[in-house]
């Protein structure tokens, strides 16, 4: 039995750092966009969605980073 190693799937060094930064940047973008959109809603619109203004930050964090 031979051990096969595919270098294209093994991320080390700069490639891993770049991937981590790209993912963090994308998640932060989702967080900021969600936060901006929810903050722009009126209290009535938030209430229709079952949200209170104090929940906006938590909802944006869950949208971007999960629970």
Image (cartoon, grey):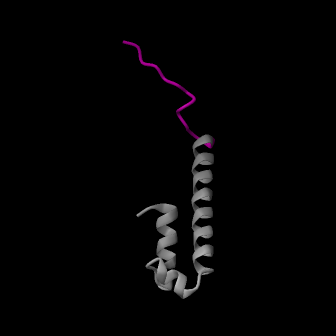
- Across and down, in percent, residue 44 comes to 53, 86
Residue 40 located left or right of residue 6: right
- Across and down, in percent, residue 6 comes to 52, 25
**Magenta-colored segment: predominant secondary structure:** loop
**Magenta residue span:** 1-14
- Across and down, in percent, residue 19 comes to 59, 46
- Across and down, in percent, residue 58 comes to 47, 74
Q: Residue furthest bottom?
A: 43
As for residue 58 lying within the magenta part, the answer is no
- Residue 13 in the image: above or below residue 41: above
> What residue is at 51 percent from the left and 81 percent from the top?
46
> What residue is at 55 percent from the left and 37 percent from the top?
11
Q: Quadrant of the C terminus?
A: bottom left
Q: Quadrant of residue 42?
A: bottom right
Q: Residue furthest left?
A: 1
* Numbered circles on residues, count: 0
- Residue 36 in the image: above or below residue 29: below
> Which of 14/65 is in front?
65
Q: Quadrant of the N terminus?
A: top left
- Residue 61 in the image: above or below residue 56: above
> Which of 30/52 is in front?
52
> What residue is at 62 percent from the left and 51 percent from the top?
22
Q: Quadrant of residue 28?
A: bottom right
> What residue is at 49 percent from the left and 62 percent from the top?
65
As for residue 2 lying within the magenta part, the answer is yes
């Amino acid at each position: 039995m031979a051990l096969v190693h595919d270098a294209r799937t093994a991320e080390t060094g700069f490639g891993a750092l770049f991937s981590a930064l790209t993912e963090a940047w994308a998640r932060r973008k989702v967080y900021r966009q969600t936060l901006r959109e929810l903050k722009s809603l009126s209290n009535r619109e938030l209430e229709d969605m079952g949200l209170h203004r104090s929940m906006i930050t938590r909802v944006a964090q869950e949208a971007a980073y999960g629970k």
